[in-house]
Image (cartoon, helix red, strand yellow):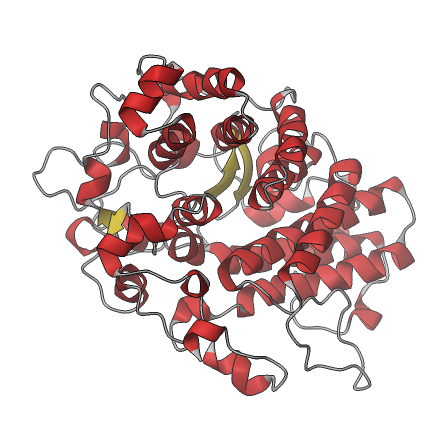
Amino acid sequence: MKKLILTIVLFSAFSCSEDILDKNPVSSFSAQGFYQTTSDAQAGVYGVYEAAQSAFRTNFAYWGEGRADAVNTNHSGDPLVLQQNTLSKTINSASWNNLYTTISRANYAIKYIPEVTSSEFGLKLIGQSRALRALCYFYAVRVWGDVPLITEPYESVEQDIFIARTDQELVLDQIVEDLIFASENCEDYYGGERDRILMTQGSANALLTQVYMWRKQYANAIESAEKVMDNSSYSLVAISDWSSIFTSGYSNESIFEVGYNATQTNSLRVLYALGSDSDYFPSEDFRNSFEDDDLRKDLIYDTTVEEPRKIWKFFGQGFNDESADPSENNIVLVRLADIILLKAEAHSNLGETEEALTLLNVIRTRAGLPNLDEATAITMYGDVASAILHERSIELSFEGHRWFDLVRNGKAIEVMNPINGLSEDANLVWPIYEDALNRNPSLEQNSFYQ
């Protein structure tokens, strides 16, 4: 189905009067005067989604792939700095501004929607806002560690605007609280494409799975993953349709996508698809990590040249558009294969090897690979956990997961030290951006960068 303009998709997700279509998304405003009707509430929530578009348009790749082993680059700026592990407080990806803009808009919606409506409809809007706030804080914690936890909008000069950093475990507690609320109050189904670009109960449970895995709460992760896997909205696509997950979007495998269109665009082309001039191309280590006969290889990058420079996963096999124009493809942040492999990882960490291998082999079978038993997994990868981590590196390649996977599994230093000298745990987080430090005297730079 032709991709709908995101504004219309979001607004049409609800039963409402037509005057909502005349409202602009909320950006910088005094919410005390804005939230008057349910239409205002819808526009406010749309503003949260719009801010998320800016937050993830480029940084989903910088944060999730740029410091890991699957990519290489010929570019200066953030791509080279991240690859060489020479991060500083002046690099663009060290800025959390767009995440906190999204959080701020969510805080306004969460506070004022109850004053507009106490209906179930209002709870669904609040659920979406809390899920988006949780998503942003989850990225913030994984990128910077301790970050300022702000859950109220700024509305008065009496409020303290210089907020110090909060212990990341307390931030994670808030993330879990928000996602549990969203999993209970968001819509289960909107119908059609809206199920992929609006926060649903399923996407909240999927994000909970990621958070629980980050916290090593494996039993909780298994429980939330099962809720996702039991949800009839989601199913793995056939390998023949695998590319469509990214090229067309809105697949049955997709759980949450950040929606874009011809007006609200992202940087996928610049990041991956400009042939010899993209930010990133597949590293030699990544290319050599495929097992024989893996059906995904030709779908991920250009295998027709000796030194491939083009990742065409997001645009289709044979993609040959050298334009640097922005992309209107959606960015798939969460999909079912991710949740299946996280559940496999959780079982492996609990010593439940049979359950872990069963789930791992579901993904391998789709890729045309033979099933692994424990002995073969040990022979090929050292242990079952490493086999699962490897499978994630191929299946979820360039989708913004690899760096976080390495950190979560305690493998970042082991993998990256031979590549760029990464050697200290304190170096796993990003520096805090110079502008944030200048504006807020209560902030203290991460220790490695002091």
- Viewer-nearest residue: 113 or 224: 224
Is residue 44 positioned above or below 158 on the image? above
Is residue 87 positioned above or below 421 on the image? below
Can you say which quadrant of the picture contains the C terminus? bottom left
Q: Is residue 95 visible?
A: yes
Is residue 272 positioned above or below 440 on the image? above
Left or right of 393, for residue 162: right
Q: Residue at x 75, y 75 (%)?
A: 154
Q: Residue at x 68, y 46 (%)?
A: 11
Q: Residue at x 48, y 15 (%)?
A: 358
Q: Residue furthest left?
A: 306
Q: How many marks?
A: 0
Q: Position of residue 396 (x, y in %)?
A: 39, 36
- Viewer-nearest residue: 235 or 226: 226
Question: Splitting the image into 4 quarters, where does residue 205 fall?
Answer: top right
Is residue 78 positioned above or below 211 on the image? below
Q: Position of residue 235 (x, y in %)?
A: 53, 20
Q: Position of residue 432 (x, y in %)?
A: 49, 73
Q: Is residue 26 visible?
A: no
Q: Residue at x 43, y 72 (%)?
A: 448
Left or right of 136, for residue 174: right
